[in-house]
Amino acid sequence: MQRGVLLQFFWGQKVSNNIVFLGDWSNLKRGELDNDYKPAEYDKEAGFKRLKDFLFDIATPTLCSIYTPLHDIYGHFEFLRDQGFTIVLCPIVWSTSTDTTDQKLTMDALNLIENYDMQYLCLGSGDGHFKDVLQAAKAKGIKVAVVYGSERSLSAEIRAMVDTYPEGHPKKGQKMLHMFSPTRQPLLTR
């Protein structure tokens, strides 16, 4: 599979070493503010290339979804679709003015953990309230990776739950963590 093509459909086929990516777009995008990117540094394509490389470095991506309220995705919809992501729109609840992203992502993740054959789950959020999702994955023997928007958005609980690269991998022993940075050069992380 080419690295340029993020998602291919594997209907009826078992992919023995696969990864599912479920991303909270608001969390990933929040990193742009936290990391104070300069306009001259911004390069969305480079950021997504590094994200794809991170996923392919672990396993074959078989399902990649971005969860977002409609107002956050303006200007990015076609780009994400062209990159092979399924966009899951999460409406805002009128009475509370809160979006349903976390709730929808959690429900879908738990359903996939129970019913989808995956070896790795990559959560595109460092928010601590997704800890139950990672615990459920680990209970089923699924290894966990995390993509986060900024150091501030990566909770200590989530960081601690991330698995390390497997035996035989060049990064063996390192946590499967990736800071999403839509810039020409990746940011250095700790």
Image (cartoon, rainbow, N blue to C red):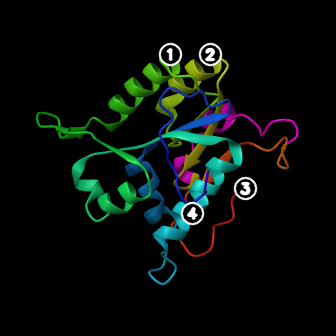
Which SS class for mark 1? helix
**Which residue position holds label 2?**
140
Q: CA distance from mark 3 to mark 1?
A: 33 Å
Q: Circles 4 and 1: CB distance less than 8 Å?
A: no
User: Residue at label 3?
Assistant: 190
Q: Considering the numbered disc 2 on the image, is that residue within a helix, a strand or a loop? A: loop
| Image point (80%, 44%), residue name | 174
Q: Nearer the viewer, mark 3 or mark 1?
A: 1
Q: In this rendering, would 109 be left or right of 46?
A: left
- Is 104 magenta? The answer is no
Left or right, 94 with respect to 81, comes to left
Q: On screen, 38 above or below 141? A: below
Disc 3/disc 4 C-alpha distance (Å): 21 Å
Label 1, on which residue? Answer: 114
Which amino acid does the dot numbered 3 rest on?
Arg
What is the C-alpha distance between the residues marked 2 and 3?
A: 29 Å
Instruction: List x then y, in percent, for residue 160.
Output: 69, 34
The amino acid type found where label 4 is placed reads Lys
Q: Earlier in the sequence, mark 3 or mark 1?
A: 1
Height in image: 92 above or below 150?
above
Residue topped by disc 4: 49
Asked which secondary structure carries label 4, the reply is helix
Start-end of magenta stretch: 152-168
Q: CA distance from mark 2 to mark 4?
A: 30 Å
Q: Quote the CA–CA distance across marks 4 and 1.
A: 30 Å
| Side of 127 where 179 appears, left or right | right
* Farthest residue, direction front: 12
Tell me the residue at 57%/47% (across/down): 147
Queried whether the magenta region covers residue 162, the answer comes back as: yes
Q: Secondary structure at mark 3?
A: loop
